[in-house]
């Protein structure tokens, strides 16, 4: 997918089975929304194939839309429409909608049900937007940053709701840049960076991607780190290096310590142990803040 | 599985979806103060002001003021709703992601467009009823010619296609500005309320505008009971150009 000469999503290949919660995880601007919108039929890929529930989202858009529920990152309702009125309207477009009251109740929209959309708070808009995605009893739900701007309570309500959806047989595809959200909610996590898929797996698999690692933060820049066998070295910044791979042993730890001695580098921290999802994420996507992909 | 959220996907019947959309847009239009001002208040004020004003000032007219001005005010009502309201409403629907969100609902684009047309016609029905009632109260005695239906329909189509064109090409704020500016310019100089024959040299240009064709056409029909095909053709031509350009340029987000 390109916008002008920017490549937003590049040779991204992934398959999501039915009945799971799948998280597309990545920093802002790496192509998460573009990926989702390509599945929803908003954009036609310049290359490659997209199939959603076996349908082409652009050519068979009309056949697909009754089956999916979409939560946009922002907007989606008239400024003057009342919250419950918007839900009622969308319910009328579907054959077997959920009762509006049920969603109003579950997402605590009762107190703002008669408030025009433009006067809702950010969190209320998010909750309404989620309700709008659920109203048609979809079998596949696309939710873009579902809990952005929500308070802690609303966040947990949303997570519980999405888990309940999965238990009832729906499939949920969500984008997020919150690691804890992916870790707590998703059955499978797809990490993308600069429009490419860099890792896929369950949260625990990704955590175990390199089960043990050594993390060295020096008080001085780590210049001229030597090569170690069967070890991958990720320079997070000029003072931080993460060592992963089969070669991560106590022997390596000793070698690093003696290298520090030789180079007169004083370790600020030197840790040996399990990495969490955040470290996997950082080592996979780099820590730079370069946004959307490279030039075509 | 029979939980609360057990999937049961499916779209409603087409007619139901279109009616839901039309009803929604109709309610939103009537709820919007600025749109009501444009659709009802301004035309009624223009009608009362011209009729009462020409009486008070003793302007000599070739007929009764209310008979001469009411057809033009009806044309003004068509212009306000079909062009300005449609442009402004659609511009903001695009800006706030409403069109985008409805794009993944079971409502198809055809359904959305049909819903808009029905809502538009419903608003016009309200406008014509109010303006007709005020005009009758002022003593309006029109001729009836079936051609007025065709003129109003093609006038609506012409203005709506250009309204959608503006909303599709410009940002929402620019759409708001342009749609209101065009409304004012056409009201003042487009042959809407006053006959194009009163404009001197510019009158010839105004007869070719959709505003002039609609205004003059409605005047000929209501005042003299006459119908001229050329005016309908001018409106049809504007519709065709507007629709083709809109189809080529309109974006949903």
Image (cartoon, rainbow, N blue to C red):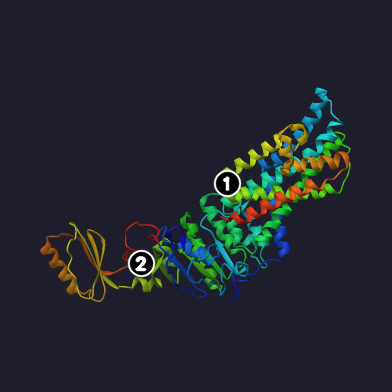
In the picture as drawn, the residue positioned furthest to the top comes out as B57
- Check the image and report above or below for A4 versus A95: above
Task: Provide the chain ID for the residue under circle 1.
Answer: B
* For residue B106, side relative to residue A30 (left or right): right
Closer to us: A29 or B211: B211
Identify which residue, A44 or A226, lies in the foreground.
A44
Contact between labelled residues 2 and 1, with CB atoms less than 8 Å apart: no
Residue A92 located left or right of residue A223: right
Numbered disc 1: secondary structure: helix
A1 to B170, vertically: above or below: below
Q: Residue at x 67, y 41 (%)?
A: B33
Left or right side of A136 for A3: left
Q: Secondary structure at mark 2?
A: helix
Instruction: For residue B26, say whether it is visible.
Output: no
Q: Which residue is mark 2?
A: A277
B56 on left or right of A293: right
User: Against B112, is A121 above or below?
Assistant: above
């Amino acid at each position: 997918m390109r916008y002008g000469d920017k490549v937003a999503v590049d040779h991204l290949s992934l398959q999501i089975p039915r009945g799971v919660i799948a998280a597309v995880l990545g920093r802002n601007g790496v192509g998460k929304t573009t990926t989702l919108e390509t599945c929803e039929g908003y954009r036609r890929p310049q290359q490659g194939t997209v199939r959603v529930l076996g349908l082409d989202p652009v050519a068979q858009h009309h056949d697909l839309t009754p089956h999916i529920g979409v939560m946009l990152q922002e907007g989606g309702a008239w400024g003057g429409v009342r919250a419950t009125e918007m839900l009622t309207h969308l319910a009328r477009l579907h054959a077997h909608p959920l009762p509006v009251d049920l969603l109003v109740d579950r997402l605590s929209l009762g107190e703002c049900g008669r408030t025009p959309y433009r006067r809702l708070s950010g969190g209320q808009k998010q909750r309404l937007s989620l309700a709008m995605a659920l109203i048609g009893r979809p079998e596949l739900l696309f939710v873009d940053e579902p809990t952005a701007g929500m308070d802690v309570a609303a966040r947990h309500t949303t997570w519980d709701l999405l888990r309940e959806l999965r238990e009832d047989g729906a499939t949920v595809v969500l984008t997020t840049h919150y690691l804890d959200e992916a870790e707590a909610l998703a059955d499978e996590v797809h990490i993308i960076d600069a429009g490419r898929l860099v890792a896929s797996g369950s949260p625990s698999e990704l955590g175990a991607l390199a089960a043990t690692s050594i993390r060295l933060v020096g008080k001085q820049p780590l210049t001229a780190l030597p090569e170690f066998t069967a070890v991958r070295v990720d320079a997070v910044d000029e003072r931080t290096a993460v060592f992963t791979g089969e070669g991560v042993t106590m022997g390596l730890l000793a070698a690093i310590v003696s290298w520090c001695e030789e180079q007169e580098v004083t370790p600020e921290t030197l840790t040996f142990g399990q990495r969490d999802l955040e470290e996997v994420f950082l080592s996979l996507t780099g820590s730079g803040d370069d946004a959307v992909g490279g030039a075509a | 599985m029979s939980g609360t959220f057990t999937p049961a996907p499916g779209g409603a019947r087409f007619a139901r979806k279109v009616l839901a959309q039309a009803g929604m847009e109709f309610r939103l239009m009537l709820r919007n103060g600025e749109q009501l001002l444009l659709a009802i208040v301004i035309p009624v004020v223009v009608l009362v002001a011209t009729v009462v004003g020409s009486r008070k000032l003793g302007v000599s007219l070739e007929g009764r003021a209310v008979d001469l001005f009411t057809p033009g005010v009806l044309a003004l009502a068509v212009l306000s709703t079909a062009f300005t309201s449609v442009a402004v409403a659609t511009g903001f629907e695009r800006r706030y992601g409403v069109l985008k969100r409805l794009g993944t609902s079971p409502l198809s684009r055809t359904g959305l467009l049909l819903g808009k047309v029905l809502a538009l016609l419903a608003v016009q029905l309200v406008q014509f009823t109010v303006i007709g009632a005020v005009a009758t109260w002022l003593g309006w005695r029109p001729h009836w010619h079936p051609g007025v239906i065709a003129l109003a329909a093609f006038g609506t189509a012409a203005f709506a296609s250009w309204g959608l064109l503006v909303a599709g090409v410009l940002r929402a704020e620019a759409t708001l500005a342009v749609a209101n500016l065009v409304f004012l310019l056409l009201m003042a100089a487009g042959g809407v309320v006053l006959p194009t024959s009163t404009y001197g040299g510019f009158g010839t240009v105004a007869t070719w505008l959709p505003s002039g064709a609609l205004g003059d056409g409605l005047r000929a029909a209501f005042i003299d009971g006459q119908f001229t095909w050329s005016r309908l053709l001018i409106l049809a031509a504007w519709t065709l150009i507007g629709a083709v350009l809109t189809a080529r340029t309109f974006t949903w987000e």
